[in-house]
Amino acid sequence: MTMGNIKVIAFTLGNEEYGLNIDHVQSIERLSHITRVPNVPNCVKGLINLRGNVIPIIDLQNRLELGEGQYTENSRVIIVKYEEIELGLIVEKTSNVINMDTDSIEPAASSGVNTDLFEGVAKYEGRLITLLKIEELMKSEVNAEDAED
């Protein structure tokens, strides 16, 4: 696989822009009814039924410890799939799909942020976009129950 360009869906949480590799994105949905589930980590908002699939919904802002997400008309659920796991991530709003040069991405380690969940920070048209590692997000979600104790 050549390092060159990746396609990233950009979205907003708080005043920051984030991105996810589009390879893992199934769809982007409007926020609909979420069925609450007892005894789950705070960031898990519940489940939705999407075209016959039951999908857990995560408040991504809460998951990244950026406070509680504010839901508006612009809020969207990004449905992501990694291996066999499907998950919905609530974001404030999605902006666009960006073709990004991999050379424009600084490794997360050099930025001093918690590197587990972050691929790196990309400079794109004067914007800084923090790229999330979907596999870490999913892995840590599956293991989040253990961390709550």
Image: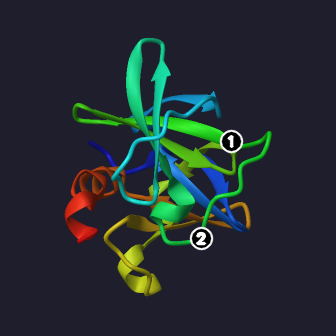
Where residue 95 sits: x, y (%)? 71, 45
Q: Residue at x 50, y 33 (%)?
A: 35
Residue type at numbered disc 2: Gly
23 sits to left or right of 123: left
Q: Nearer the viewer, residue 57 or 77?
A: 57
Q: Secondary structure at mark 2?
A: loop
Amino acid bearing label 1: Asn
Write down the residue under mark 1.
96
Please report the residue visible at 40 percent of the width from the left and 30 percent of the height from the top.
55
Expressed as whole percent of the image width and height from the top left, the position of residue 123 reads 61, 67
Q: Is residue 117 left or right of residue 145?
A: right
> Which color scheme did the rendering employ for the protein?
rainbow
For the point 72% across and 60% down, the residue is 125
Cα–Cα span, label 1 and label 2: 24 Å
Quadrant including the C terminus: bottom left
Label drawn at residue 67:
2
Which label's residue is closer to the chain start, 1 or 2? 2
Q: Residue furthest front?
A: 38
* Secondary element type, mark 1: strand
